[in-house]
């Protein structure tokens, strides 16, 4: 260990040499002091005022100690076996296995990793067939494999779904067939093997940073067995009920709330690991997207940094932000969309720098990004706008740029067919998603761009609405200042920000960069200018939305802009003097403990930690159903759950109550306040009794459910017509009434069949 520390001790000694020790000391003190100020305020306003109870729970402090101990054990193992690759691999795998098995996540992790390796293999196979695969250049090759493999798999999945063969087993068979076919052109080295080799060949300080990122990934795998957030259980974790019908995801399920008509490319990608008896298989895929995102951020940073250590340091700073990391233990589309949006920006930057085939993969990534979160309709066009701006800039300022483009076009004519095939596959995949939306809603996209589609002559289908209110909050300079102060230092009044805090790290790096540019404005060199030019629009777009979205928006809304802004603002730091860089990095590294702690205790489900410590390797991995059953018993729904178990699979239910709990029942449930919401649904469906009865008939509703203690709901004029229908139906002799401790279920199946 002494041999490893000696170079760094000598480096520190040289930095503190008499030549510039006083100046360096003052700068270092100022930077560290300002860094501490940026953290001490949120420690009080967030960690203590909001999460103090969460911090003292066994799942938090025991889970935190467990993660730190695992990290230290991994560090010691890597140092001890520094010259033995096999022993290093065996040790890392063994420690990871023990941690994942204790948290019931090992089997889901292995299955998800195998799934991703199949996608990589499919992509490599296609590039070999089209003669586009080049000699191995680095981990970035695997982004190309993933983009192509993902596109092809989605293309065939959508195709068989169109012909009514899109059930869970059919999609799994398709995946296996494509995986086997991909081996006929040779076996490609697995992505996980390449990552390990790159890790093993890195310096020890790079390994230390990479292992901390690995610990953050392990944390998310552990959280997946512990945390179930509202949105995930609403539409991400139950595709067997709210996505896939009897034949495919093209089947109409009679759902009203617009979340069921978002672009469903990511949820379709989750089908092979869905409906397996436990939610953790779905979560594991999202966590691996987080892992891919970390790799991409590292690759992005290498485009303008000088060393691997700087790249891993930037990745670690970004990779410990709660808003980014904690999306890894959800079934939401944020990381999927962020990955493809950033991948598009990455390839566009590479094309500006090298003028090669990167523009093809950037275009495909842009296309695929629209299949996830609707924020892609904002951020991906901004990335494309930045790319066009960069092209215009270089055409105007670089005499060789235009000739390079012409020579590139001439040299690539022979591959025009191959490029066209890849673009066609990606476009058809997106078109298939839009066609599903059009078939079910009447609009190619829903709820975004509904105004445009209406003006073009499209008409929304019953029972959906073409109007969804979502106002912005505008104000003067004092409002904007208060808004940003709260977002950065005291977001406890913004419920959807405090549970997924984007942090104030990016703003701190921005301030340092402004000072550095003021001292010496020539800080964006030739290597970094493409990153800056392409990122400018998305950074401004993210800042505008953070300023004016109601209640601060959601912390996860801004992830693509947050990552690119942090990367861009860090650029001036990479070109500064060595001693100043050390001082800045010392200040920045102090952000990691706070960000890591907040990531541990916070979550979009408001669950905390990773579970209390228990050295038990025999826990069942299929415990989601058991947890659901325990929850339904505790809230007085058990008798209703047993009744539903005895009836048909494709049943439909609407009603009132705790919707997050009611989503756990074995039926396709929708919450009436959501159905009648001006934002989520269509209020006209519950305006009067006849409208509500028409909806019940059209949607083939089997069950109505409402709490026994419903006095508050009954006094609301909004739901008066709904309760009038409930009361009338409860008196009908053909209606079966089932009562549990706290709820009443009305089975109206016999009435609906008449």
Image (cartoon, rainbow, N blue to C red):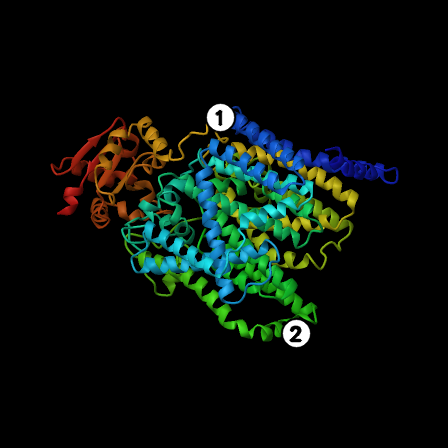
Q: Nearer the viewer, residue 237 or 670?
A: 237
Q: Residue 247 at x, y = what percent?
A: 28, 53
Q: Earlier in the sequence, mark 1 or mark 2?
A: 2
Left or right: residue 448 versus residue 521 is: left
Instruction: Name the residue tied to disc 1.
Output: 615
Residue at 72%, 35% in the rendered image: 32
Instruction: Name the residue tied to disc 2.
Output: 403
- Report which quarter residue 669 is drawn in: top left
Q: Nearer the viewer, residue 123 or 339?
A: 123
Task: Please state, as top left, top right, bottom left or bottom right, where the N terminus lies in the image.
Answer: top right
Residue 547 numbered mark, or none: none
Which type of secondary structure does the marked residue at label 1 adopt?
A: loop
**Eye-nearest disc, 1 or 2:** 1
- Report which quarter residue 314 is drawn in: top right
Q: Nearer the viewer, residue 119 or 481?
A: 119
The image shows residue 75, relative to residue 431, as above or below, that is: above
Q: Residue 382 at x, y = what percent?
A: 55, 58
Q: Looking at this rendering, what residue extends furthest in the left direction?
A: 733
Question: Pointer 1 and pointer 2: residues touching (CB < 8 Å)?
Answer: no
Q: Nearer the viewer, residue 165 or 113?
A: 113
Q: How far apart, in angstroms, are the residues tagged by discs 1 and 2?
A: 65 Å
Left or right: residue 11 versus residue 209 is: right
Residue at 38%, 35% in the rendered image: 622
Q: Residues within 10 Å of mark 2 (few under 14, many from 20)?
A: few
Q: Residue 747 at x, y = what percent?
A: 19, 38
Q: Looking at this rendering, what residue extends furthest in the right direction?
A: 19
Which type of secondary structure does the marked residue at label 2 adopt?
A: helix
Please say whether residue 327 is visible from this viewpoint. Answer: yes
Number of numbered discs overlaid on the protein picture: 2
Please say whether residue 446 is visible from this viewpoint. Answer: no
Q: Residue 69 at x, y = what percent?
A: 59, 29
């Amino acid at each position: 260990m002494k041999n490893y520390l000696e170079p760094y001790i000598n480096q520190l000694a040289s930095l503190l040499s008499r030549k510039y020790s006083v100046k360096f000391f003052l700068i270092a003190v100022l930077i560290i002091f300002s860094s501490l100020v940026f953290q001490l305020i949120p420690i009080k306003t967030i960690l203590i005022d909001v999460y103090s109870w969460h911090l003292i729970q066994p799942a938090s402090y025991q889970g935190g100690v467990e993660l730190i101990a695992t990290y230290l054990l991994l560090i010691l193992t890597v140092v001890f076996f520094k010259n033995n690759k096999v022993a290093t691999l065996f040790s890392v795998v063994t420690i990871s296995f023990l941690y994942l098995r204790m948290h019931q996540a090992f089997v889901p992790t292995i299955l998800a990793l195998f799934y991703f390796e199949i996608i990589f293999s499919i992509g490599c196979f296609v590039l070999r067939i089209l003669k586009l695969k080049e000699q191995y250049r680095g981990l970035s090759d695997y982004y190309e494999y993933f983009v192509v493999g993902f596109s092809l798999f989605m293309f065939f999945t959508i195709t068989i779904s169109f012909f009514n063969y899109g059930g869970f087993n059919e999609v799994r068979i398709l995946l296996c067939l494509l995986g086997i076919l991909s081996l006929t052109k040779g076996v490609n080295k697995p992505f996980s093997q390449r990552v390990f080799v790159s890790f093993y060949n890195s310096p020890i300080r790079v390994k230390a940073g990479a292992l901390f990122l690995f610990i953050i990934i392990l944390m998310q795998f552990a959280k997946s067995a512990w945390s179930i957030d509202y949105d995930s259980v609403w539409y991400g974790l139950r595709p067997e009920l709210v996505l896939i019908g009897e034949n495919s995801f093209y089947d109409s399920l009679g759902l009203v709330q617009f979340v069921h008509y978002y672009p469903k490319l990511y949820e379709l990608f989750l089908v092979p690991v869905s409906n397996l008896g436990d939610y953790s298989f779905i979560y594991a895929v999202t966590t691996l997207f987080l892992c891919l995102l970390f790799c991409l951020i590292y690759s992005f940073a290498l485009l303008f940094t000088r060393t691997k250590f700087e790249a891993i340091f930037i990745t670690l700073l970004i990779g410990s932000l709660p808003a980014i990391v904690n999306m890894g233990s959800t079934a939401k589309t944020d990381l999927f969309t962020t990955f493809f949006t950033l991948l598009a920006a990455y390839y566009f930057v590479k094309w500006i720098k090298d003028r090669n085939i990167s523009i093809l993969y950037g275009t495909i990534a842009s296309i695929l990004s629209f299949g996830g979160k609707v924020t892609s309709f904002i951020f991906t066009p901004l990335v494309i706008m930045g790319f066009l701006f960069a092209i215009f800039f270089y055409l105007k300022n670089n005499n060789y740029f235009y000739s390079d483009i012409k020579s590139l076009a001439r040299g690539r004519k022979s591959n025009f067919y191959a490029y066209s095939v890849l673009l066609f596959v990606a476009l058809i995949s997106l078109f298939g998603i839009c066609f599903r939306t059009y078939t079910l809603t009447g609009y190619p996209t829903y709820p975004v761009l509904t105004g445009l589609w209406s003006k073009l002559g499209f008409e929304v289908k019953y029972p959906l609405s073409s109007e969804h209110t979502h106002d912005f909050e505008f104000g003067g300079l004092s409002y904007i200042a208060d808004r940003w102060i709260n977002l950065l230092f005291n977001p406890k009044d913004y419920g959807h920000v405090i549970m997924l805090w984007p942090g104030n790290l990016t703003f701190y790096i921005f301030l340092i960069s402004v000072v550095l540019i003021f001292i010496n404005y020539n800080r964006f060199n030739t290597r970094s200018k493409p990153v800056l030019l392409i990122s400018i629009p998305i950074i401004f777009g993210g800042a505008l939305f953070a300023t004016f979205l109601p209640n601060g928006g959601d912390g996860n809304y801004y992830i693509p802009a947050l990552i690119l802004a942090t990367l861009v603002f860090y650029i001036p730091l990479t070109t500064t003097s060595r001693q100043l860089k050390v001082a800045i990095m010392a200040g920045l590294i102090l952000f990691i403990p706070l960000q890591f702690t907040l990531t541990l205790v916070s979550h979009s489900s408001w669950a905390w930690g990773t579970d209390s410590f228990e050295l038990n390797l025999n826990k069942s991995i299929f415990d989601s159903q058991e947890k659901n059953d325990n929850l339904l018993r505790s809230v007085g729904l058990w008798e209703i759950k047993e009744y539903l178990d005895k009836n048909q699979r494709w049943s439909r239910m609407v009603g009132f109550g705790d919707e997050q709990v009611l989503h756990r029942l074995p039926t396709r449930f929708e919450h009436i306040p959501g159905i009648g919401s001006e934002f989520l649904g269509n209020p006209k469906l519950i305006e009067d009794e006849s409208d509500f009865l028409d909806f019940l008939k059209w949607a083939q509703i089997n069950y109505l459910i409402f709490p026994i203690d419903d006095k508050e709901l009954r006094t609301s004029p909004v739901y008066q017509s709904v309760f009038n229908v409930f009361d009338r139906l409860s008196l009908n002799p053909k209606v079966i009434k089932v009562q549990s401790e706290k709820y009443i279920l009305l089975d109206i199946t016999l009435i609906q069949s008449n």
